[in-house]
Image: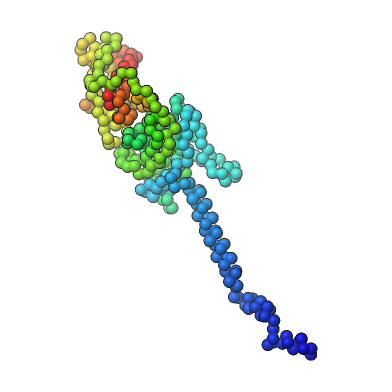
């Protein structure tokens, strides 16, 4: 036996082979453990980032009291509004756009409008959600109601995943920032809110003529129309303004005329239109309508009156320039 063979006997194995044998015995090296730990940490970071990406930035998602989430997907301004609503991976897969709560993914308005596109996401295992209603306010807290047919309601039970639009024709044009708040059906809240830059910002010129103190009387065609009283409420969800009109024909009080549409216009161009139906006429003779910011020095009330008897087709448009 050679000297080299003797040196490689059982008691004289090479150190490198001994270490290799020990690794095969089920004891992973420290380098392997660090690799698996690093992969786990990277996976956690990537997963967290992906969840945040899918949920949207924090300022675009708000948690409601029932545990569901309200996500502001997009904001459009103008007369034509369009939003697809699909995420990029859904577009790659050719998935059709999700359902919409009211108008659909594209629609037009008769004038410049601000439209918020939102989605309601349920909490895990949640089956019941309450509807919420959108209202825009400015930095003074002035209240602006939506003009969508559903009163700005955002989807509740049975409408999960649908996109919903809340549109506004009446906006405070002097405000730099707007707050879209969501309230319950009694106007309590806001339960969630989003702050956006006002795309309709403009400085309006004051009216040439200042608004007059009430009562204000306008005579047209032998008929006298008087805005007797104007009151404001700070509670409720819709139509926080109330007005009382008196009409006289040939010097005698007349009940033949009723207000049909009330349009409120401010010097900055803001406009709120209210159609007066039966539920908006109160027992005390007043009618409820939507107003604008009460801090405006002057409101122009354009009231369309309709004659209820005997000639139903006769109408008169009367303008009152008043102090709110």
Residue 273 x %, y %: 36, 25
At 46% from the left and 36% from the top, the residue drawn is: 75
User: Going by the image, does 323 lie left or right of 119?
Assistant: left
Q: Is residue 275 visible?
A: no
For this orientation, the residue located farthest to the right is 2
Q: Residue 209's spot in the image, x, y percent?
A: 31, 18
| Point 51% across, 53% down: residue | 49
Residue at the image point whose x is 24% and y is 22% from the top = 213
Q: As displayed, is residue 96 above or below residue 42?
A: above
192 above or below 208? Answer: below
Q: Nearer the viewer, residue 274 or 74?
A: 74
* Residue farthest to the left, as pictured: 252
Residue reaching furthest bottom? 1
Q: Which one is nearer the viewer's eye here, 192 or 245?
A: 192
Q: Residue at x 66, y 76 (%)?
A: 20
10 relative to 184, above or below: below
Could you tell me residue 118's position as x and y percent? Answer: 45, 40
Horizontally, residue 283 falls left or right of residue 127, namely left
Residue 249 x/y as whole percent: 24, 12
Q: Is residue 91 above or below residue 215?
A: below
Residue 21 sits in which quadrant? bottom right
Where is residue 315, by image quadrant? top left
- Please tell me how many numbered marks the rendered image carries: 0
On the image, which quarter does residue 36 sit in? Answer: bottom right
**Depth check, front residue: 222 or 272:** 272
| Image quarter (top left, top right, bottom left or bottom right) of the C terminus | top left
Tell me if residue 89 can be seen: yes
């Amino acid at each position: 036996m050679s000297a080299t063979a003797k040196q490689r006997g059982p008691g004289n194995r090479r150190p490198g082979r001994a270490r290799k044998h020990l690794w095969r015995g089920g004891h992973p090296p420290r380098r392997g453990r660090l690799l698996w730990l690093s992969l786990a940490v990277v996976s956690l970071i990537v997963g967290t980032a992906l969840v945040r990406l899918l949920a949207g930035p924090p300022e675009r998602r708000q948690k409601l009291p029932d545990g569901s989430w309200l996500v502001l997907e997009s904001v459009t301004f103008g007369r034509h509004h369009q939003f697809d609503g699909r995420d990029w991976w859904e577009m790659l897969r050719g998935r059709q756009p999700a359902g919409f709560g009211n108008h659909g993914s594209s629609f037009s308005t008769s004038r410049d409008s601000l439209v918020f596109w939102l989605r309601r996401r349920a909490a895990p295992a949640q089956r019941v959600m309450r509807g919420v209603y959108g209202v825009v306010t400015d930095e003074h807290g002035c209240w602006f109601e939506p003009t969508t047919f559903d009163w700005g309601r955002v989807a509740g039970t049975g409408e999960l995943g649908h996109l919903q639009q809340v549109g506004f024709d009446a906006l405070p044009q002097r405000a730099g920032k707007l707050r879209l708040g969501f309230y319950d059906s009694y106007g309590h809240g806001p339960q969630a809110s989003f702050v956006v830059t006002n795309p309709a910002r403009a400085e309006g010129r004051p009216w040439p003529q200042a608004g007059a103190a009430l009562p204000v009387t306008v005579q047209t065609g032998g008929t006298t129309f008087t805005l007797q009283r104007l009151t404001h409420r700070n509670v409720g969800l819709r139509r926080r303004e109330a007005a009382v009109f008196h009409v006289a024909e040939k010097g005698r009080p007349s009940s033949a005329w009723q207000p049909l549409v009330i349009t409120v216009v401010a010097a900055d161009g803001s406009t709120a239109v209210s159609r007066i139906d039966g539920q908006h006429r109160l027992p005390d003779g007043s009618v409820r309508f939507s107003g604008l910011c009460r801090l405006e020095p002057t409101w122009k009330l354009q009231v369309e009156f309709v004659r209820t008897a005997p000639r139903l087709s006769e109408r008169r448009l009367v303008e009152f320039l008043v102090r709110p």
